[in-house]
Image: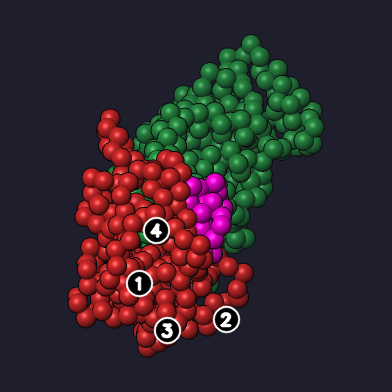
Chain colours: A red, B green
């Protein structure tokens, strides 16, 4: 394991995500709380990056910014060369639908839809026909090992299985980028291991760029790189490259 | 079925108790609205069923005061008048004062000719014209009190003193459902001959003359001409169309009708508040789902349509059941109300109003939750408790 400083991370390699001078603060009552301050760094294509740091360090905020569900106060975020901070809301929604797959801590599946219908959901935003949507959703569920659970409702699945359905939903549109916010935070060790192995496989075999926020060092160890946002010094980012 | 419709349909089953209670409220509200509207409409049924070529001539002071029977010939002589008959409110009590039903003394032959909406079988008509104490009863009245041909019934007079016996000659039906079949008709000559003995001052008088006018164009002229004949007499007349007469009658109870109408709309407003509360709770509970949908690319409009669809679906189901229950409930109410409401028929207009009310409730109840869900900040929504 080597430790790199931020400046070293910006290389000529194939950059997918480039954050430049990004700041973000939140208003808490009359008080403005800075979370990220003038942050600049890149994430390379086909990267599996774990973002670590203590609570309140801004890692989830950074993930939200990268995923285009939050906007910075200052700076630019380029994904695949496109500055997503300049996109209006409707275009940003389309961009997310096409380019980002989300994996949440609590799975966030639609409880009234079956596993197959949940996975199919993002495809309804595409021009695909019903049969093709079904086929793709079934294929995605097969990739996460849930071909035999297609007709189950989320309430009929274990936590690990639900998270695998969520992963299938995240990859069904074949996005470039997967963002995962504490994907194993609600899982037992065995389920967490299975989920992380699936994510590793998606990164290794399918070339998905994955940005994962986690508190868990065991989970982070599955990533290719770990970045730590240090609380109290938001301008300083530590990068650990796993060999 | 589209994914949107699947979500909408399944979402309404998520809180079955809540949805069921909301549905019950909607059903009761739409049903109450329909029944109350029907009651109001029924009150105006006489107005709607009025024949335009028929005039009613009454005492100008009040329709409770009689007119001399001798006026009939003079009215018949007015140009444009084709036929004249008369009817007199009897106001008798059958066994007990709570047994109210309308009773009229009529000139049998001319009245039945001029009011073809009263369907009397030929044999019944012959018997009625033959029997001086004869009476005919409407189908509903016969059913209510079990009257059948050959029965002799007694009414205690309130306007005309004494006990009065009538022989039931038969039962009449209405030409259309709006025709009042809760009435009893008996012969005026029986009334008059008895009054000549019992109460001479009340004899040879009638309540109202019904006038059949030859042409619709001359109705106004004939009306004026009749009243002109009796101007400056002891009993001046007021002649008006049957419709105007009925409106005047209904106007006496207008305050009650307005109250019923207001209550019917208040019921809808209350269910709107209940429904809006249900939808607000629903939207609040699902903020994280809506945020998730928005995160994965669905538009705020899609999220709003989920709530709108759910609200309209619930309102439509409740509305449909409420509408479906209205006719049997109205019919049952008509039976219970004895002769107060001869018929309670739910009109197509009332059904449309009920459907409209249900849809409007569905839409309005969803407005604020839709707005909230569509505007939910994704990051805040994802943090919301599910």
Chain letter of the residue carrying label 2: A
Residue, disc 4: A8
Reply yes or no: does residue B114 show up in magenta: no
Percent coordinates x, y for residue B289 in the rendering:
37, 59
Q: Check whether the beta carbons of the residues at disc 2 and disc 3 lie within 8 A of each other.
A: no
Percent coordinates x, y for residue B228 in the rendering:
70, 17
Q: Check whether the beta carbons of the residues at disc 2 and disc 1 lie within 8 A of each other.
A: no
Residue at x 60%, y 54% (from the top left corner) = B176
Percent coordinates x, y for residue B4 in the rendering:
50, 64
Residue A120, numbered circle = none
Residue at x 51%, y 73% (from the top left corner) = A174
- Of labels 2 and 1, the one closer to you: 1
Residue at x 56%, y 34% (from the top left corner) = B246
Between B46 and A205, the residue placed more toward the observer is A205
Residue at x 53%, y 39% (from the top left corner) = B44
Chain letter of the residue carrying label 1: A
Query: For the magenta stretch, what is the residue range?
Result: A76-99
Q: Check whether the beta carbons of the residues at disc 4 and disc 2 lie within 8 A of each other.
A: no
Residue, disc 3: A143
Residue, disc 2: A131
Q: Earlier in the sequence, mark 4 or mark 2?
A: 4
Judge the density around disc 4: few (<14), some (14-19), many (≥20) Cα neighbours within 10 Å: few
């Amino acid at each position: 394991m080597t430790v790199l400083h931020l400046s070293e991370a910006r290389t000529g390699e194939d950059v997918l995500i480039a954050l430049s001078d990004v700041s973000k603060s939140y208003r808490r009552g009359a008080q403005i709380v800075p979370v990220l301050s003038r942050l600049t760094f890149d994430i390379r294509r086909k990267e599996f990056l774990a973002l670590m740091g203590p609570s309140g360090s801004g890692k989830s905020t950074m993930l939200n910014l990268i995923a285009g569900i939050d906007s910075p106060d200052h700076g630019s975020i380029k994904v695949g060369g496109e500055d997503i901070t300049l996109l209006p809301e409707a275009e940003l929604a389309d961009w997310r639908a096409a380019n980002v797959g989300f994996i949440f801590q609590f799975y966030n599946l639609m409880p009234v839809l079956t596993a197959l219908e949940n996975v199919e959901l993002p495809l309804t935003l595409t021009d695909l026909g019903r049969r093709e949507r079904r086929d793709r959703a079934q294929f995605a569920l097969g990739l996460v090992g849930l071909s035999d659970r297609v007709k189950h409702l989320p309430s009929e699945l274990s936590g690990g299985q639900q998270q695998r359905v969520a992963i299938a939903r995240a990859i069904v549109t074949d996005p470039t980028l997967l963002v995962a916010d504490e994907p194993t935070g609600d899982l037992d060790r065995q389920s967490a291991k299975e989920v992380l192995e699936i994510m590793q496989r998606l990164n290794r075999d399918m070339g998905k760029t994955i940005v994962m926020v986690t508190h868990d060092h065991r989970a982070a160890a599955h990533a290719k790189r770990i970045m730590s946002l240090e609380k109290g010094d938001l301008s300083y980012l530590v990068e650990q490259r796993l060999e | 079925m589209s994914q949107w419709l699947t979500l909408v349909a399944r979402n309404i089953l998520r809180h079955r108790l809540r949805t069921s209670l909301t549905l019950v409220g909607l059903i009761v509200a739409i049903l109450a609205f329909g029944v109350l509207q029907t009651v109001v409409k029924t009150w105006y049924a006489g107005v709607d069923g009025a024949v335009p070529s028929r005039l009613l001539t009454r005492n100008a002071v009040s329709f409770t005061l009689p007119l001399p029977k001798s006026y009939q010939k003079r009215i018949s002589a007015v140009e444009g008048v084709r036929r004249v008959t008369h009817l007199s409110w009897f106001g008798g009590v059958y066994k007990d004062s709570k047994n109210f039903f309308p009773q009229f003394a009529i000139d049998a032959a001319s009245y039945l000719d001029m009011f073809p909406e009263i369907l009397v079988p030929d044999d019944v008509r012959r018997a009625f014209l033959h029997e001086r104490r004869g009476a005919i009863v409407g189908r509903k009245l016969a059913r209510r009190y079990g009257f059948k041909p050959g029965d002799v019934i007694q009414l205690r007079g309130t306007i005309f003193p004494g006990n009065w016996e009538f022989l039931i000659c038969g039962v009449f039906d209405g030409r259309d459902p709006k025709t009042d079949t809760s009435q009893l008709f008996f012969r005026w000559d029986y009334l008059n001959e008895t009054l000549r003995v019992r109460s001479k001052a009340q004899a040879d008088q009638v309540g109202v003359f019904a006038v059949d006018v030859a042409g619709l164009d001359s109705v106004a002229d004939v009306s004026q001409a009749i009243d002109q004949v009796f101007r400056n007499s002891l009993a001046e007349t007021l002649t008006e169309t049957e419709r105007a007469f009925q409106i005047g009658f209904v106007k006496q109870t207008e305050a009650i009708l307005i109250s019923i109408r207001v209550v019917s709309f208040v019921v809808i407003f209350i269910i709107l508040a209940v429904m809006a509360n249900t939808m607000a709770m629903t939207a609040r509970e699902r903020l994280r789902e809506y945020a998730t949908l928005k995160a994965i690319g669905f538009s705020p409009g899609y999220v709003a349509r989920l709530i709108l669809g759910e609200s309209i679906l619930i309102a439509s189901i409740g509305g449909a059941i409420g509408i479906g229950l209205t006719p049997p409930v109205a019919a049952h109410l008509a039976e219970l109300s004895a002769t107060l409401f001869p018929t309670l028929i739910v009109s197509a207009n009332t059904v449309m109003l009920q459907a409209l009310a249900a849809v409007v409730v569905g839409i309005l109840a969803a407005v604020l939750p839709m707005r909230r869900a569509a505007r939910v900040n994704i990051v805040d929504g994802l943090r919301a408790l599910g």
